[in-house]
Image (tube, rainbow, N blue to C red):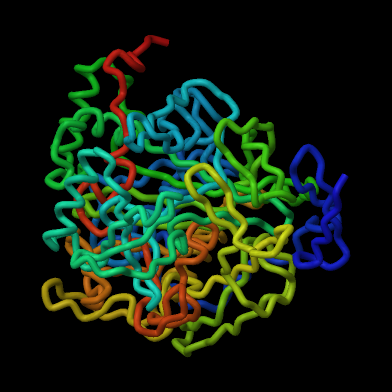
Amino acid sequence: MNKLNCHQALPGCTVKTASGFALLLAACLAPLAQAQVLPTDVKPTCTTSTPPSAGAPPAPAFAQWFEPAGVRVDGLVKPADSVNFPDASACSFYQWSEQMFLWLVSPTPKNLSGGDRIFLSSAFYGVSPEVSVGGKPTRTFIPQDQKHAMKFSPMLTQLGPHNLPIGFDKSGKLVEVLPPPAGNKRLLQLQTQLKNGSLGENAVQSIKANVNGGLKYQDAAGNDVDVTIGQAGGNVLMAQNGSLVYYSIVTNDLYAYFFTQNAAADPSKLQYPTTAEELAKVADYAKKSKFKPLAAPEALAMEIKMSWIETTGFDDATKKKFITIKAEVPKVDTNNIKSANLQNSPTRKVELALVGMHVVGSAKGNPELIWATFEHDHNTPNAEYSYFDVNGATKTVPQDTKGKWLFSQDGATGPFDQRLYDTSSTTITCLDKSNPCVVKPNNTLRWKPWGAAANQNPRQADPTHPGPVITPPESNTDIISINQSIISQLADGDVRKNYRMIGSTWTTGGRAPDKASAGAINQVGTSMLANTTMETVFQGVNVDWLGDVSGNPKYPSLNCFACHSTNTVNTSHLWTKLTPLPTAHLKAKSK
């Protein structure tokens, strides 16, 4: 047995490697002593009962979110009504986001089959990891009718607006990288667009530089560009307990049916359903195709991305603070991660704990989708932020890394959010150039704690869509307030009390997002939003708007709309890679 001293994580603990995986002794992590403490004196600017707009009636009582009505431990929460979404104040978006999260992680009701939580049930489809079929990146829908151990991957690839891998040039500017087309029709079309300039200034072509397979990169004019690939294009994260972070994606049944119905349509001219009439067309198609009826049609189209870590080192009390599932993960030797390859890798059965979730969905007036993200309160410490207390005074919460965190060392002083591991195709690569590779967890800090940069108004003056300018303290106050409202009303012992909404973002009028170079005027809500378990290196290097992942003060740090930059179905990076459901699949059955 090999031993790895994990003093980077918690002093005095030792990792022993067994069966090719680093196992943390219970004393290393359990019990977790630190969690994000929300200010209790926050001004209640956004609660579950806040009206959607001035003069409107109060929103339904929190107890009415449950089915049947009444707050209960692990009680079933109804989905938010996206068809009749008020599309009014920022708080209405935050209420939508919170209710959707609570619904997704609710226990599965008797009228659905599959796993123990809604997102694991027959109301949703799993989405397979990406594989190459005939040279085309391909994903498939995985029915969740039966309860089974889900399969996960530790690889998370971020893609740009044209569904291409992203990297950074030497100045720190984000670029999309077009692979050699090799006869692929779509890549050939994109290559033509690159040459005529219609693909945009942030695209480069990768070209084989030598017979050994090396690559170089050129812009539309044929100039060589110095590009670091994978800076944000592929990311592998390790928690303080030695577990890699694993990722999964699901979509709801409406998304799957809508995709199957429109798979042959031009995605650049198609939007997700946002109205009752558009919903009716999907429901009618499902009926004619003899698919199962929509489980929650009022939710409209939804895509959910999740991050997980192994429960290694968790005591029983700690486990009860997490949503956990049984799963299969690749058997990776983290003491030899430099040569780890996931292609046809054997798997092993583990227990995973949910640490992050993106909740993304269409709603009335919002074809660009509402983008919300949630994290477990034990994940990582916050950088400094400000908010308004009940008297309207500005309070500042300083950065404090002391405590036992899942993704940061007790008292860590930085550097934070470093990219220690990367992925290329199916291979995990250690970026440490020493030999042997030094295996260590990441120290992560949440630079924009509630999705707002300290020196940029989350909602700016928008001449094309009038609305109130919202300052960073105002925005932070809204998010802290809705979190406090939810947590204070959930029953004691409800595992959902341990998760926090970091923020939610959308565009004014449901328009395609403005570019960052134009000031991102129409990107509102928590407009510098990132999840520390999924966009670890996207956050920038400070609390400000400018200062990207390379530390370049010329470019802004990134948010959801940096890559999901349209209000068509292409805003989802799944759309062009999915295969339709078989028309004979999931036929309605009488029970």
The picture quadrant where one finds residue 368 is bottom left
The residue at the point 15 percent across, 43 percent down is: 270
> In this view of the protein, which residue sits in the foreground, 247 or 528?
247
Q: Residue at x 35, y 56 (%)?
A: 371
Q: Nearer the viewer, residue 531 or 315?
A: 531
Q: Is residue 11 left or right of residue 416?
A: right
346 is higher (above) or lower (below) than 423? above
Spot occupied by residue 209 in the image (x, y as percentages of width and height): 37, 57
Residue at (15, 52) in percent of width and height: 192
Q: How many marks?
A: 0
> Where does the C terminus fall, quadrant-wise?
top left
Looking at the picture, does residue 162 appear above or below residue 300? below
- Picture coordinates of residue 223, whole percent (x, y): 25, 69
Q: Can residue 399 be seen by looking at this rendering? A: yes
Q: Residue at x 17, y 46 (%)?
A: 189
> With 564 as the anchor, is 248 left or right in this view?
right
The single residue placed furthest to the bottom in the displayed view is 393
Specify the farthest residue to the top.
590
Pinpoint residue 248: horizontal percent, then vertical percent: 50, 42
In this rendering, the answer to whether 135 lies above or below 461 is: above
Residue 93 image position (x, y, % from top left): 33, 60
Quarter location, residue 370: bottom left
Return the residue found at the far front: 211
Quadrant assignment for the N terminus? top right
Image position of 185 with respect to 230: above or below: above
Asked if residue 402 lies left or right of residue 371, the reply is right
Residue 300 can be seen, yes or no: no
